[in-house]
Image (spheres, rainbow, N blue to C red):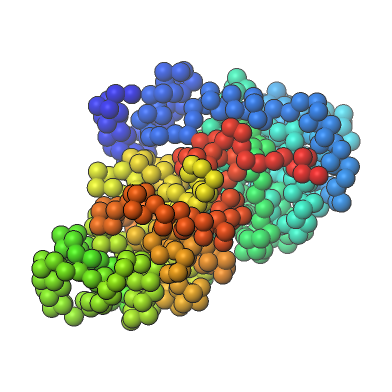
Amino acid sequence: MPLSLRATTVAALRIVRRWPPVHAVVHQLALQLIKTRWGERFVRGAVGPEAQTDREYRAWVETYDTLDDANRDAIRAHISRLARRPLISVVMTAYRSDPRLLREAVASVQGQLYPHWELCIAEDGSPGDDTWGTVDALASQDPRIKAVRREANGGIAAATNSAIALAAGEYVAFLDHDDLLAERALYEVAAELDVHPDADLVFSDEDKLDERGLRSQPHHKTDWNAELMLSVNAVNHLTVVRRSLLIDLGGLREGFDGAQDHDLVLRVAERTTPRRIRHIPWVLYHWRWQGRQGSYSRTRLAECAAAAQRAVQEHLARTGQAATAVVTPGRPWLRVRRVLPVPAPLASIIVPTRDRAELLAQCAEGVLKKTAYAPLELLIVDNGSEEPATLALFERLRADPRVRILPAPGPFNFAALMNRAVEAARGEIIVLLNNDISMTGDGWLAEMIAQAVRPNVGAVGARLLYPHDDIQHAGVVLGVGGGDGRVAGHLYAGAPAGHAGYQGHLALARNVSAVTAACLAMRKAVYREVGGMDAAGLAVAFNDVDLCLKVRAAGYDVVWTPHAELYHHESASRGSDLAPETAERFRSEVAVMRDRWGPVLDADPFYGPVFDKRHTNYRLGCPPDRRPPWTLG
């Protein structure tokens, strides 16, 4: 798409998104456009860089996600070797169902390679006898199908609970009446349960199926992501829950139709641990998005958004989080606004510098005059500045009682400078900030500290933009890049600032494996607990990644938030790690990270094995870096 046309389209989209009814119409038009080759390119070009087109995805499916008879035989052989083969109850509701789509949904269960299943269908009081007639006929032809007819329509939650009441399985899987399970779906679930028998919840990736039966728009998910779940149902389909826990929770809650599954997953998470929530990184569920009826969530968006908001708000209340969930206008997700404690904690903002007075002056002005947070101190770590302009700037800054200059001469060692400064910091919260940072607004620090004070959060990162408004930092992905020494890279670096990213990841607060120390907030106590930065082995590069991995290993979450936004003039004062004079040091630091964290770097839970690790834009790997369970022994 020509840049001028793309810029015009992007600008128009920003306006349209402010008007939800208009945006809904434009969105439906876009869904029709992407069915043509030109239209798909146009839409993808307007909304931003995407990993691949739907046609490319279907070619990938043909190569990497199509079973042959040898695969099926291997799967059956693996099933016979499983230590446990639990009965899985698939539950479904039917209301005014299209008979053809309903039969296809049922057939996708009957075609499962895993034989230990039952299908429990609750017909929800549809008018007339057509839907019940179809359900009753299907049940009469297959003893594995149980069915009940409700006397009156009760809605999604009530009808699902009626289906759950029929279930006898150890686990319950949820299937909509017009969607399809992949033939390997329940086998993959059983294989996961064989390795993790204590799992309380298992979920998979999903894609969409149009009226022509073509697969598109895959959603390859992160592993359990508690922060992302507060903005959107990041679990969705396929969801499988331990039946005893489901019964203890009272099943689905009525009054949350359209977000009943989101509410359920949040309540399950409250009763289990992250380790017992398992993600299968493969598409096992096909969501029919262009059927004649349309799903509840697409036809009643406002009601669904309100139900999701209430589900998240109640979850926040039950878990003692001082925060408010609000609906994002024109977007299918929420934002959680967190409340700062009273009194607000002192924040020590640590800025290392060596000369470059113009950069430091801009950064200091942003902290002292353009940041709406108090109390704070600005601790400038002077790594041997000599230029008169810098020394004069120090004198001017010392006039502000919030500023301290910490002399730290010697060779540049970022990790050592940070460790020294943290010990000198007076604040409960420390904020590592590069001297080449400038502010886009005044709320960044309050947003980060509201996250950092949470007891489960160990580190918080911000959304950083290049000066020309493209994305510089939206979280760190592990194990990406070229060559054998892959350590980490920035997600979606270079994407337009207005781009929401894959599944909204550039617009939503979420858990990540690491964030950059160019702007990183954390409690001083956590920094000390994990031993700070590695000044001996990681003097310059990857010390922030190493710090975050130690934070996660200690049991804390790392959170990236798009609601704290700043400009980063990257490496404006230090230079590149790839310059000839620093290349050997960089190679040494890569080796330290690979030796220390190799298996962790190769298995980022927030950037799954299906993605191509040469990129950070969610492009699928060819082949994907995931061995199917029937090949593992």
Q: Residue 69, image x and y in percent?
A: 80, 26
Image quadrant assignment for residue 79: top right
Residue 356: image location, x then y, percent: 18, 61
Relative placement, left or right, of 123 versus 442 is: right
State the image quarter where residue 621 is shown: top right
Task: Please give the name of the residue rendered at 49% of the width and 30% of the height, measured from the top-left corner.
Answer: 52
Q: Nearer the viewer, residue 131 or 37?
A: 37
Look at the image and tell me whether residue 531 can be seen: yes
Front residue of this view, candidates 377 and 139: 377
Horizontal and vertical percent position of residue 483: 51, 42
Residue at (57% x, 59% y) in the render? 595
**In this figure, what is the number of numbered marks?**
0
* Image side of residue 562 versus residue 246, left or right: left
Left or right of 166 on screen, residue 50 = left
Q: Residue 430 occupies which quadrant of the picture?
A: bottom left
Residue 3 drawn at (x, y percent): 27, 27
Question: Residue 297, can we see it?
Answer: no
Q: Residue at x 49, y 42 (%)?
A: 482
Residue 252 vs 131, above or below: the answer is below
- Rendered residue at 75%/55% (across/down): 196
Q: Work out which quarter of the rendered image holds the C terminus and state it.
A: top right
Q: Give the position of the N terminus as an image quadrant.
A: top left
Using the image, determine if residue 215 lies above or below residue 512.
above
Question: Relative to the observer, which residue lies in front, 370 or 92?
Answer: 370
Q: Toward the viewer: 391 or 464?
A: 391
